[in-house]
């Protein structure tokens, strides 16, 4: 290894406490997503806040985990370390509940398409610090962002203060998602298992929807899968397909299993053929092992991966994302439940638009027909929250009761088709609502 790189590494190596002390009051800090949230650094920053040594720090992040929940997102520290979420997880939902109980408002939230998050953080927010987990340095002096190049790579390139937690469990991933030691302000060594996203047992309804969607996927198609049981069910139903490709914001355990099974070989892709491309990965330990120095996988920044113009350069892109409710015009609310932020827009619209712009591409929105143990219809007269995917963007909608192609359909035809996807117990009421709204 180059002795200059080793010397720079040793000069910048320090304790988590020393590294956290480099973050000043008033800092705007970008945290790694999911598996990249660094436990030692975040606990050291939380300890400074508990000791009254820092205040007015704003934390910008997506998809937090227990690592952040038990440290910097502790409710007792919210007045000194202010969370600003761009994608809620169960951590923020629990924090919102606790804040309401104490008479406080919800966690601050920034709506943004995932493809735009790097620009939002760098230009609009102007974050000044990046704190994230990386793999050990290689012989060229580079650290790999591993599972999470997403917005970490653009922020690191912006001139922000870069503070890294080096963890031997973080896989070194091929592709441009790297940062050189010369760009780093501090290096903390801390080995701990990466956060895992356990698989959820699939229900018969999940499996039925997964089979319906798999029937819409031709051999040679290029896949994007969102997060949750329904995309996992689709992966499980694709085991007899061949020559599939991957260009996805999130690399999942289900997608990795398709590569290992030979279902995905990326041979029919128009850009980056032979390579599965992703912006971040979150799943089980076999997924992380699969990514480690795998020449068939590359991690890229999300403003590349999720750019609809880039997505559309591959033919036959199949985008599969879940939603929470769909109105009779075809608009989708995929992020709001009972008047509260539940998740976020994420990359849903990026891939809805990119897939439809792809030659032969299909954008699929999937959901169970009902929620709350069958007592609530997900096909509704009017959305109860903000529009995530607009009615003009929605293409194919799939529930356990069927598939509807909304492109080229009038509002009357859309209402009829969507009522047909609802649970039969709710169809009469939806039809009455459609008549009252002048749709029928």
Image (spheres, helix red, strand yellow):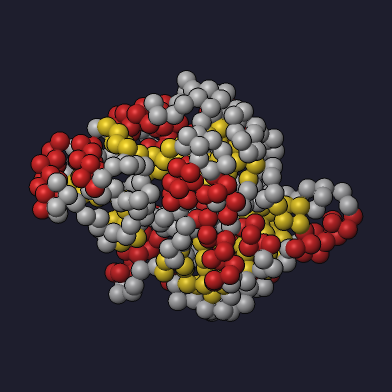
Q: 336 or 187, which is in the foreground?
A: 336
Question: What residue appears at the point 53 percent right and 66 percent down from the top-left corner?
Answer: 120
Relative to 205, residue 159 above or below: below
Relative to 194, residue 206 above or below: above
Question: What residue appears at the point 63 percent right and 45 percent down from the top-left corner?
Answer: 299
Q: 296 or 21, which is in the foreground?
A: 296
Q: Position of residue 95 (x, y in %)?
A: 38, 63
Tell me the quarter of the picture where residue 206 sits: top left
Question: What residue appears at the point 10 percent right and 41 percent down from the top-left corner?
Answer: 428
Q: Residue furthest right?
A: 3
Q: Position of residue 349 (x, y in %)?
A: 43, 51
Tell me the quarter of the picture where residue 420 sits: top left
Relative to 412, residue 98 above or below: below
Would residue 56 be seen by someone viewing this image from the given angle? yes
Q: Is residue 253 left or right of residue 156?
A: left
Q: Position of residue 101 (x, y in %)?
A: 29, 69
């Amino acid at each position: 290894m180059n002795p200059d790189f080793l010397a720079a590494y040793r000069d910048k190596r320090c304790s988590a406490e020393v590294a956290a002390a480099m973050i000043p009051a008033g800092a705007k800090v970008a945290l790694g997503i999911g598996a990249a949230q660094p436990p030692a650094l975040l606990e050291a920053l939380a300890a400074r806040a508990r000791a009254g040594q820092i205040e007015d720090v704003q934390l910008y992040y997506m998809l937090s985990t227990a690592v952040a929940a038990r440290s910097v997102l502790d409710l007792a520290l919210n007045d000194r370390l202010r969370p600003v979420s761009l994608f809620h997880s169960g951590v923020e939902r629990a924090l919102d509940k606790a804040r309401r109980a104490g008479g406080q408002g919800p966690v601050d939230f920034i709506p943004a398409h995932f493809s735009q998050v790097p620009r939002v953080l760098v230009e609009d927010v102007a974050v000044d610090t990046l704190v994230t987990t990386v793999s050990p340095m290689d012989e060229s002096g580079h650290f790999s962002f591993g599972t999470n190049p997403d917005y970490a790579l653009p922020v690191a390139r912006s001139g922000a203060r870069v503070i890294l937690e080096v963890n031997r469990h973080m896989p070194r991933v091929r592709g441009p998602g790297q940062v050189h030691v010369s760009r780093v302000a501090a290096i903390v060594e801390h080995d701990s298992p990466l956060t895992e996203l356990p698989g959820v047992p699939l229900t018969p309804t999940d499996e039925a929807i997964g089979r319906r969607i798999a029937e819409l996927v031709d051999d040679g198609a290029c896949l994007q899968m969102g997060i949750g049981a329904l995309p996992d069910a689709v992966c499980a139903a694709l085991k007899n397909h061949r020559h599939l490709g991957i260009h996805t914001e999130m690399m999942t355990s289900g997608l990795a299993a398709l590569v290992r099974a030979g279902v995905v070989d990326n041979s029919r892709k128009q850009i980056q053929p032979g390579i599965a491309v992703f912006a971040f990965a979150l799943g089980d330990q076999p997924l992380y092992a699969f990514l480690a120095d795998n020449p068939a996988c590359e991690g890229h920044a999300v403003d590349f991966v999720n750019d609809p113009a880039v997505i559309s350069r591959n033919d036959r892109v199949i985008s599969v994302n879940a939603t929470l409710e769909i109105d009779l015009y075809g608009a989708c609310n995929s992020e709001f439940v009972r008047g509260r932020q539940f998740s976020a827009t994420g990359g849903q619209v990026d891939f809805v638009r990119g897939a439809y712009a792809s030659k032969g591409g299909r954008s699929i929105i999937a959901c169970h027909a009902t929620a709350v143990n069958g007592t609530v219809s997900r096909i509704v007269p009017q959305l109860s929250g903000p529009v995530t995917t607009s009615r003009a963007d929605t293409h194919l909608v799939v529930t356990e009761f069927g598939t509807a192609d909304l492109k080229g359909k009038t509002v009357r035809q859309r209402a009829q088709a969507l009522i047909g996807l609802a649970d039969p117990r709710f169809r009469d009421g939806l039809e009455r609502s459609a008549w009252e709204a002048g749709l029928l």
